[in-house]
Amino acid sequence: HARTHEFFLILKGSSSGRVGGRRRVFRRGDYVFMPAGTLHEFRAGPRGVELLDVFCPRLDLERPDIVFPRGGGFGA
């Protein structure tokens, strides 16, 4: 997100993805703060994930200020 900071806390299950180009696996109790402009992507783990996701300022779901990396994705 170009203007929106994001924080999430894994409550249950797991998730994997990339934050700032680094591959990570997140499990219950893990948390991440991503300042505005931090490239990230996530996928729920095999048994799903429940998380608390906080955006500041409030994320406008009509226009979520999403930023895509050059080339259109993170790649494999």
Image: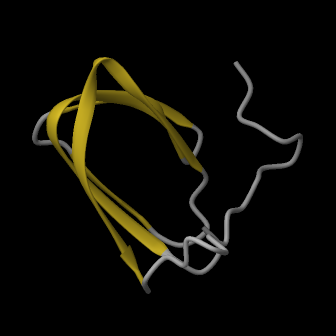
Judge by depth and name the residue closer to the eye, 58 or 3.
58
The colour scheme used here is secondary structure
Task: Please provide percent x and percent y for residue 33.
Answer: 34, 62
Judge by depth and name the residue closer to the eye, 75 or 53.
53
Position of residue 33 in the picture relative to residue 9 (left or right): right
- Please name the residue shown 70% across and 18% down the image: 76
Q: Is residue 61 visible?
A: yes
- Please name the residue shown 63% across and 74% down the image: 62
Task: Please provide percent x and percent y for residue 37.
Answer: 61, 67
Position of residue 35 in the picture relative to residue 54 (left or right): right
Position of residue 6 in the picture relative to residue 60 (left or right): left
Q: Farthest residue to the top: give it.
A: 46
How many numbered callouts? Answer: 0
Task: Please provide percent x and percent y for residue 51.
Answer: 23, 47
- Please name the residue shown 44% across and 86% down the image: 57
Place residue 38 in its image quadrant: bottom right
Instruction: Judge whether 73 appears above or below 25 on screen.
Output: below
Instruction: Judge whether 19 appears above or below 49 on screen.
Output: below
Q: Is residue 24 visible?
A: no
Q: Farthest residue to the bottom: give it.
A: 57
Q: Farthest residue to the front: give it.
A: 62
Quarter containing the N terminus: bottom right
Instruction: Judge whether 53 appears above or below 13 on screen.
Output: below
- Please name the residue shown 18% across and 42% down the image: 30
